[in-house]
Image (cartoon, helix red, strand yellow):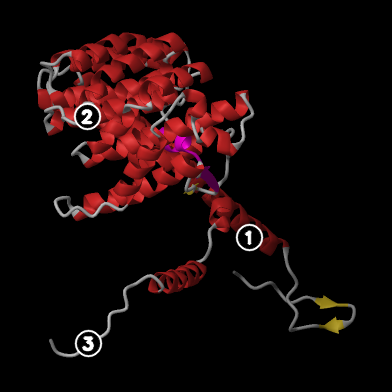
Amino acid sequence: MPRAKKRSGRGGQQGNVQPFSDEDASIETLSHCSSLSERTSAAEEAGETEEMAQEDFQYKLKVYIDSTVDKSAKTRQGALDGLKTAMATKILYEFISERRMTITDSIERCLKKGKGVEQCAAASLACLLCIQLGSGIESEEVFKTLKPVFKTILNDGAANIQARQACATSLGLCTLVAEDDIMDVYATMECFESLFTHSYVRKDGSRPSVNPQTTQLHTNALLSWALLLTICTGSHIRAIAQKHLSKLPRLLENDDVNMRIAAGETIALLFELIRDVDSKSLLLTKTAYICSKEFDYDGWEPLCEKLSALATDCNKHRAKTDKRKQRSVFRDVLKAVEEGDFQSETIRFGTERMVIDSWVRKRTYDAFREFVGSGMNYHLQANEFIRDVFELGPPMLIDSAALKAMKSSRLERHLYNAAAFKARTKARNKFRDKRVDVGEF
């Protein structure tokens, strides 16, 4: 910057002082404006880049939708998987709403004409489509088109067994989201009952000869049946308890660990629902409805003995991982049946938390997570329908700066983890087997 000329004032010469000239002010103003324009242009470039990325993403989705009717089965499979990934990780309501019938037609075609893996992908995509659209007229239109196809595949003994398993799971969740008539919900539950009841151990103790793939089909049907049980009326829950509560314990003797766990969780869920109905309608005390006399259940003690045996199972012919998973689940099931307790769990997503404090919430959360997968936390934050299901209120709008300020520092996280590790180690040491050397054998 050029130096200003020396000026003499009335007080004499001041050679060391250089006043701020008009030229300096103009240069300073220009530098300010240039830095401001640079920031503005950077923000505009970022906005343009984001807009271009959004356009590229939508273009890919359009290509996927068009590829679902390709002649190549491999291309159709890739397109279905691409749409599944996009719907599981992003909120695409506006884009999908305009093209929902096109996507629905593609799903229907893949379910009818595809084979095995392609049918499974199409069934999962149907669920994600309903989750994106939410509970309303749009998802009802989609489900009315796909429900007959689901039921046809599900009841067809000659159909691919993996496709039947996928349809059993997808039909349950789509019914929960998009079915508008409770009588149709009951009809779908009867469809599931016609499947999993084939796995009941007979009264004489003989077990039905069912292969592992069919057992998995019956397990999926049982879990979907339990999911729809969460939205039934009180009178229907009572009728179901009268019909099935004495028979469901027979599934606990199944050879498949997943079926045993599904049966145990369903029994705990049914007890929780009937207790809730009794407490609201009859204002019973805890002791009164624990004894289950109101719905004529006489197998209380045998059921608790069976659950206790599964919670402490140590049979050598079963895998260690199966026994560990089974014991963990049935300890909670036994508490639920005997005391009406539930081991609560906290789910953290963003700056929010959700407490899973009942078997109803657990079954619902597990059903959504099965399809959304790792994108569940994102959907809990941004998907209005899922937030409404779990009573989380409207989505919270938090900018990136505020979110960064809320995060704890790396040192704080390290200290917290170290303290938690120390406390956990102390607690476990109390229950560990402290072996000592006893000399040579």
- Label 2, label 3: how far apart the Cα atoms are: 49 Å
Q: Earlier in the sequence, mark 2 or mark 3?
A: 2
Q: Are marks 1 and 2 in contact (CB under 8 Å)?
A: no
Q: Is residue 436 visible?
A: yes
Residue 180: x percent and y percent?
A: 46, 12
Secondary structure beneath label 1:
helix
Q: Amino acid at mark 2?
A: Val
Q: Are marks 2 and 3 in contact (CB under 8 Å)?
A: no
Residue 394: x percent and y percent?
A: 58, 33
Label 1 sits on residue: 27
Q: Is residue 63 visible?
A: no
Q: Nearer the viewer, residue 150 or 197?
A: 197
Q: Amino acid at mark 1?
A: Ile
Q: Nearer the viewer, residue 59 or 227?
A: 227
Label 3 sits on residue: 438
- Label 1, label 3: how far apart the Cα atoms are: 89 Å
| Quarter where residue 429 is shown | bottom left
For label 3, the crowd category at 10 Å Cα-Cα, with few meaning under 14, some 14 to 19 and many 20 or more, is few
Q: Residue at x 32, y 42 (%)?
A: 306
Q: Residue at x 23, y 19 (%)?
A: 66
Q: Tell whether position 90 is magenta.
A: no
Give the number of the disc on residue 201.
Answer: 2
- Label 1, label 2: how far apart the Cα atoms are: 91 Å
Q: Which-is-in-front pick, marks 1 and 3?
A: 3
Q: Is residue 267 left or right of residue 81?
A: right
Magenta-highlighted residues: 352-364
Q: Tell whether position 360 is magenta.
A: yes
